[in-house]
Amino acid sequence: MAGSHGKFVWHELMTTDVKAAGAFYGKVFGWSVEGEGYAHINTGGQSIGGIMELSKHLCDIGVRPHWGGYIAVDDVDAYAAKIETAGGKVHKAPDDIPDTGRFAVVADPAGAHFMIFKGETPDARVRPPMGTPGFFDWNEQYGGDPGASMKWYADLFGWTAADALDMGPVMGTYQIFYIAGVPSGGLMKKVPDMPMPMWLYYVAVDDIDAAQKRVTDNAGVSIFGPTEVPGGMWIVHALDPQQALFAMVGPKKK
């Protein structure tokens, strides 16, 4: 995946009901979800992610429906080793996805999980402008010290630090980061009501209030927001009908 190193290139939902989840997100974001077994998420003429069923084994050990992000690397095996050396963990050793690429499931030192990935062929997709509805627009880590997290990801993937915003005594510092010169997400300490460190992924919408209504009209639950964030945008955190956490960002039209 030449030219994509260090970028989030795929987002994936693991869930207990692939068909129902696909129908829900189709109604909320206008996605087309296609495929049996592993369903591809399509929007704007691009495939941007996938939905797959949680295995019985994972359910039995307490893994709940969740979204995960894939970061492209030049060499999955080498970066899995670098992640361990740098204080992270490898939870699934590098393995091949037939006719697709190679991946590993890893975690940063704070315990937030993500995947590293290298495709068999270069990624020809062109990322649309920030704020394009239906596309993943922001990637947010809830971990430990955001300064330490920023250094860890910068050293590994070349991310660069931007503004560090003071969010108050409970939430602390919010460290914005850029990937390849593009604002791509933020790092902050885990808030008390989150059960574990994690990454949260935001989908852009054209009207945050209308999107929130589509969530609740289709058996989802809005758990936070709308809340205004810098830049005149608003965010909502929500649960889908299978209880996977996701987030949305967009303007208010009224």
Image: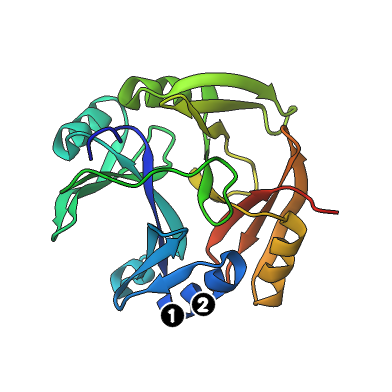
Left or right of 187: which side holds 70?
A: left
Q: What x and y, as percent, mark residue 24?
A: 55, 74
Pointer 2: what residue?
A: 23
Q: Amino acid at mark 2?
A: Ala
Q: Is residue 225 above or below residue 186?
A: below
Pointer 1: what residue?
A: 19
Q: Quadrant of the C terminus?
A: bottom right
Q: Is residue 17 above or below residue 69?
A: below
Q: Is residue 250 above or below residue 26?
A: above
**90 vs 157, nearest the viewer:** 157
Q: Quadrant of the N terminus?
A: top left
User: Under tag 2, what secondary structure?
Assistant: helix
Return the residue found at the far right: 254
**251 vs 80, nearest the viewer:** 251
**114 vs 31, nearest the viewer:** 31
Residue at image coords 54%, 69% = 25
Q: Would you say the residues marked 1 and 2 are in contact, meaning their CB atoms lie under 8 Å apart?
A: yes
Tally the marks. 2
Residue at image coords 14%, 59% = 99
Q: Is residue 146 above or below residue 34?
A: above
Q: What x and y, as percent, mark residue 151?
A: 42, 19
Name the quadrant containing residue 134.
bottom right
Q: Amino acid at mark 1?
A: Lys
Q: Is residue 62 visible?
A: no
